[in-house]
Amino acid sequence: MNAETQGHKADRQASAAIRACSIFLVLASVGASQAGWFGPSNVRECVLDRMQGVKSDVAASAIIAACAAEFREKPKPRNIPIPAHVMATLDVRGSLRSSYASGKIYNGNDEWHITEISLTVRFRADEGANVHTPLSRQYQVDVDIAPQGSGDFHIWELHVPPELHPIGWSVAAARGYPADQ
């Protein structure tokens, strides 16, 4: 082999080494950027992070199972009626209009997370109105109020005849779950 051919061969080898190194750096940076600053944030990142250097199918299966368990979605707490002593700590304030209601609910206990309230809205009828509907209605309102927290609520449509006018409300019931769940 002459000197010129050996030089081309060396150039090709160097070029191949640079390409391989470049590909490795790109792949390494993609893997690092997926893992986040403080470790993996989902099952996929966890598996990619922990599979480095693993050659055994048994070890790979164990890693996949461990990552799946680590990032398994927690079951939602059971939504149940709250006890009477917790009901007594709910403070509902707001405004009633002819077609909607809105306000703020304060959850004054430190044991229960409130997820739903049932408001009874009372109405008065125009004088002389021939009313055949009840003078109160219940409305279910989904909320998300932590212990000692507050949240807004809205009833966008009261759906009442025009001769009825809202005059007040009260909390009829509430649902939620213990905060330690």
Image (cartoon, grey):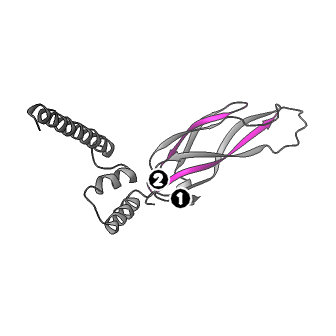
The label number, if any, that marks residue 109 in the structure image: 2
Q: Position of residue 153 (x, y in %)?
A: 58, 39
CA neighbours of label 1 inside 10 A, class few (<14), some (14 to 19), many (20+): few
Examine the rendering and report whether any part of residue 86 can be seen: yes
As helix, strand or loop, the secondary structure at mark 2 comes to: loop
Q: Can you say whether 48 is above or below 131 in the image?
A: below
Q: Position of residue 131 (x, y in %)?
A: 88, 39
The label number, if any, that marks residue 85 in the structure image: 1
Quadrant in which the C terminus appears? bottom left
As helix, strand or loop, the secondary structure at mark 1 comes to: helix
The earlier-in-sequence mark between 1 and 2 is 1
Q: How many marks?
A: 2
Q: Residue at x 38, y 61 (%)?
A: 64
Q: Is residue 137 left or right of residue 109?
A: right
Seen from this angle, which residue lies furthest left? 3
Can residue 115 be found in the magenta stretch?
Answer: yes
